Amino acid sequence: MNGFAFLVGGVLPYFAVLVFVLGMSYRLRVWYRTPQPAKLKLYGPSETTTARAVLAEALFFPSLFKGDRALWAMSWFFHATLALVFVGHFRVVTGVIDHSLLSLGMSERAIGQMSAGAGGGAGIVLVVTGLLLLGRRLTTPRVREVSGLPDFFALLLLLAIFATGDLMRLGAHVDLAETRRWAASLLVFSPVVPEHGLFLVHAGLALVLFMYIPFSKILHLGGIFFTQALVKRS
Ligand code: HEM
């Protein structure tokens, strides 16, 4: 195994998990320790209503829809497609979804075709919506004013991950069985790393993203449940 492959595929995954777990523990501690306004029990919404409203906010972004339709469309499609891509990665790494579809009577060929269509389409939608979100930050004066280096870094990092993923999907094919073997080998602390250049760049960038999440605004993914619970409850 060459040195780059060993570092990216054999060392970085463990380091990234460590940074992520420590970073998240710190962030959760800060959130839980932040004083919250008193709960409005008598006339305020019940806990169930609050939970439902927070879930709806996290899934469909209704407040954003009311405020800015164009931004809502870009953001919602961006996040929904990202969720689809994560399902696809879960399929590649575990093989669980394939087993279920095969047992439901779907052929391997049909599964492959469905994955190629959904994955290929999703990858393109992500690049397009990501570029639109980046363009909005650069060209809308009001948005540009409140955009800092971290906002651009997060978007560019995501775009680099999407682009390398798309290149693998659409051209420089990687053996998915090797990817699965790699993931399994990490679990038993005996990494067997695929020596595919683009795969290593894609996975390396994804692990950088993973480490960056606890310290960045990408954590709105979890923060929304804390902040929206406060907003909907008061
Ligand atoms: C270490 C983690 C990751 C690994 C090992 C990995 C691996 C892969 C592989 C092997 C492919 C090609 C699939 C194919 O040809 O069928 C791919 C595609 C892709 N990846 Fe990743 N990936 C990782 C993380 C991520 C993350 C975090 C994102 C997004 C933020 C992402 C976004 C994409 C996209 C958009 C594609 C193209 C569309 C698709 O095939 O779904 N990947 N990835």
Image (spheres, helix red, strand yellow):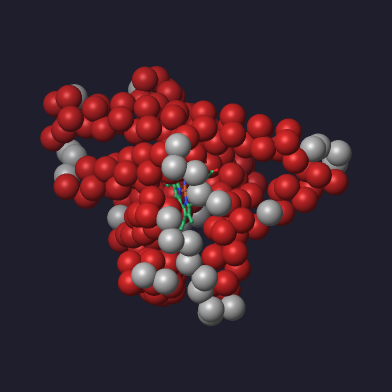
Closer-to-camera residue (196/97): 196
Residue shown at 51% from the left, 29% from the top? 121
- Is residue 101 at all visible to an observer of this figure? yes
On the image, the x and y values in percent for residue 151 come to 24, 44
Q: Is residue 81 above or below residue 195?
A: above
On the image, the x and y values in percent for residue 206 come to 39, 55
Q: On the image, which quarter does residue 203 sit in?
A: bottom left
184 sits left or right of 168 in the view: right
Q: On the image, which quarter does residue 168 sit in?
A: top left
Quadrant where the C terminus sits is: top left
Looking at this rendering, what residue extends furthest in the bottom direction?
189
156 sits left or right of 138 in the view: right
On the image, the x and y values in percent for residue 16 come to 39, 68
Residue shown at 79% from the left, 37% from the top? 107
79 sits left or right of 205 in the view: right
120 sits left or right of 108 in the view: left
Quadrant where the N terminus sits is: bottom left
Closer-to-camera residue (89/63): 89
- Is residue 16 at all visible to an observer of this figure? no
Closer-to-camera residue (140/206): 206
